[in-house]
Image: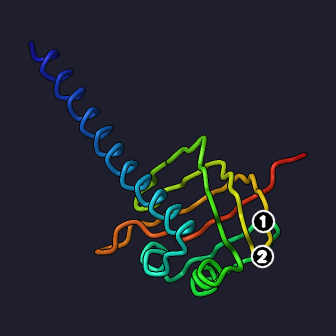
Amino acid sequence: MKTVLIFITLLMSITTTTLAQTAEEKEVAAAVEALRKAMVDSDKAALEKLAANELTYGHSAGKIEDKALFVDNLTNGNSDFVTIDLTDQTIRIVGNTALVRHTLTADTNDGGKPGKVKLGVLQVWQKQTGGGWKLLARQSFKFPQ
């Protein structure tokens, strides 16, 4: 009987831990989706809210932006996403950090020039006290031809 109670207690604690991780993963997924939408909509307020002040945003061509430049380029037309589709997304929570990987496929209109991109992306999100999940870092890469 004692063994059965220990087993049930252990099973309940594992289930509780799994549910807590799932809830955090859902929060991060919602933040990723909010960022996707803000990028397509060029929503300055949303972009500033989602990005950490310490943001480092890496493009596949090697260009690195801080938070101010990231927001400015998305709202002034230099980096204009008409559509963004995210697929093959994985989320891994490590403490107050979330590692998100996905494939980004998008139609762009950068500087008035239409284009298409397909990139691999790694995002690093940080759960900040009182501020929720914030994008701390992002790096994209081109798939081999």
Residue 10 image label: none
Horizontal side of 53 relative to 69 (left or right) equals left
Give how far across and how far down residue 124 sits, in percent: 55, 62
Give how far across and how far down residue 105 sits, in percent: 68, 51
Q: Residue under label 2, please give it.
A: 63
Q: Which residue is drawn at 23% across and 28% down?
A: 10
| Residue sitting at the far left | 1
Q: In which quarter of the image is residue 121?
A: bottom right
Identify the element where label 1 is drawn: strand
Q: Which residue is drawn at 59% across and 69% down?
A: 137
Q: Measured along the vertical axis of the image, is residue 31 above or below residue 19?
A: below
How far, Cα to Cα, is label 2 from label 1?
A: 20 Å
Q: Quadrant of residue 30?
A: bottom left
Q: Residue under label 1, please give it.
A: 114
Nearer to me, 40 or 29:
40
Q: Residue at x 54, y 44 (%)?
A: 90
Q: Which of marks 2 and 1 is nearer the N terminus?
A: 2
Which tag is nearer the camera, tag 2 or tag 1?
1
Give how far across and how far down residue 58 sits, in percent: 70, 70
Q: What residue type is labelled 1?
A: Pro
| Residue sitting at the far right | 145
